[in-house]
Structures are given as C-alpha cells and as structure tokens.
Image: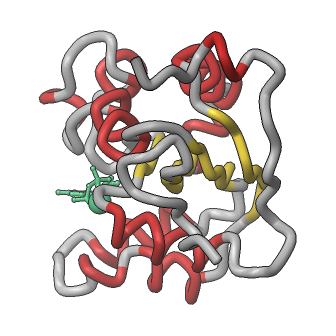
Amino acid sequence: SKPIAGVKGTFSERTFIAIKPDGVQRGLVGKVISRFEERGYKLVGLKALAPSKELAEKHYDDLKARPFFAGLVNYMTSGTPVIAMVWEGKDVIKQGRAMIGATNPLESAPGTIRGQYCISVGRNIIHGSDSFESAEKEIGLWFGKAGELVEWTPANVDWIQSDN
Ligand code: IDP
Ligand code: MG
C-alpha cells in the first residue's frame, strides 16, 4: 500500500498542516483553509484537538534541546484546539512551506500566511511539514488511527490536475 504521505512528486503527495492555538483564537481557520483549497489542494484529513503534552513533545522532538522548547510545548498545549489537517496534491510539501512563509514572521514575505497574519516567532499561527520524511512522521502521529484520512476524487479534478 502507498506510504501515509502518498507518493512524493505525484498528485498523491501529502503534507501535515496544523493551525496552532493562536490561529484558532484569532479566527484565522477559514482563511488558512481557503488558501489551500483555492490553490487546488485536496483536504483528506481534518480534526480539532487539544494535543497532550506527549503529542506536542513528539511532534517537536527535533527541537527538544532548544531554549524555547518548553515554551513551545506550553503554547501548543494551552487547551485551545489545534486544527490538524492533511492536504494532498502535487508538490504540496514544498508549496505548503512556501505558502506559510519563513519561521520568523518578520522574515516571511508579504502575502504568505505568516507574512500576512503574524509578527512573533513564538505565535506564528501555523505548522507545515518540512520534508517528505517529516510529513510521514507527522501524519502518522496526528492521524495514526485507521480510517482518519479519506480517499476521494474532487468533481473538478480534471480542471486542476494535468500532466501537460
Ligand atoms: P517551522 O515551524 O517554520 O518549521 P521550526 O524551526 O521547526 O520552524 O520551529 C518550530 C516552531 O517552534 C516554530 O514554528 C515556532 O512556533 C517555534 N520557534 C522556532 N524558533 C523559535 C524561537 O526562536 N523562539 C520561540 N519559538 C520558536
Ligand atoms: Mg519545523
């Protein structure tokens, strides 16, 4: 069966995108979803959850030695939900990162999600997987249970996908 993050470089490639608690509190969920929808990406998984400390720590495991790690985990586990999503489509991992913008919103290009909606690295409203390997890990972590992702074909698929 295909990898949980789809097949890299094809229309089945998948990425993990999460709207962080500040994005939810600030009412930006719809705007973020619209950007991915309007680009032509397909939503295959979506849920609201207040992540446990264990989940937040596993998600950011690569940053555990950084001085901001404890604050980052507290921010993610505030009790406000995170909106966890899986988006699918060609080059969605790299394009998703480009749409999100630089980690520090003050360095994010205007017009990117962070460049439009935030000004603090510690309140940068959104997460996106940074590589195929990260997407596999993160989708597995947040959508590990069978049946949480949906295989479907948008009615407008031929108006979005073409190999020529
Ligand atoms: P990314 O979210 O753009 O992939 P990472 O370097 O993976 O950036 O960092 C993960 C998250 O940790 C950032 O999105 C941000 O919320 C937080 N973070 C990163 N650097 C800092 C910092 O210097 N101070 C506070 N929080 C930070
Ligand atoms: Mg990262």
Image quarter in which the N terminus is found: bottom right
Residue 131 in the image: state x and y as whole percent.
30, 60
Q: Image check: 64 left or right of 75?
A: left
Dividing the picture into quadrants, the one containing residue 8 is bottom left
> In this picture, is 137 found above or below 65?
above
Q: x%, y% of residue 25? A: 66, 37
Residue sitting at x 69%, y 71% = 143
In the image, taking residue 43 as reference, residue 67 lies left or right, namely left
Q: Is residue 164 left or right of residue 131?
A: right
Q: Quadrant of the C terminus?
A: top left
Residue 57: image location, x then y, percent: 45, 83
The answer to whether 44 is drawn above or below residue 117 in the figure is: below
Q: Name the colour scheme.
A: secondary structure
Residue at image location 52% in from the left, 41% down from the top: 11
Give the camera-side residue of 78 and 60: 60
Tell me if I can see residue 58 in this picture: yes
Counting labels gives 0
Q: Nearer the viewer, residue 138 or 124?
A: 138
| Relative to 36, residue 145 above or below | below
- Residue 103: percent from left, percent from top: 23, 44
Q: Residue at x 47, y 72 (%)?
A: 136
Q: Residue furthest left?
A: 107
Visible residue check, residue 22: no
Q: Residue at x 52, y 64 (%)?
A: 5
Q: Quadrant of ligand 2?
A: bottom left
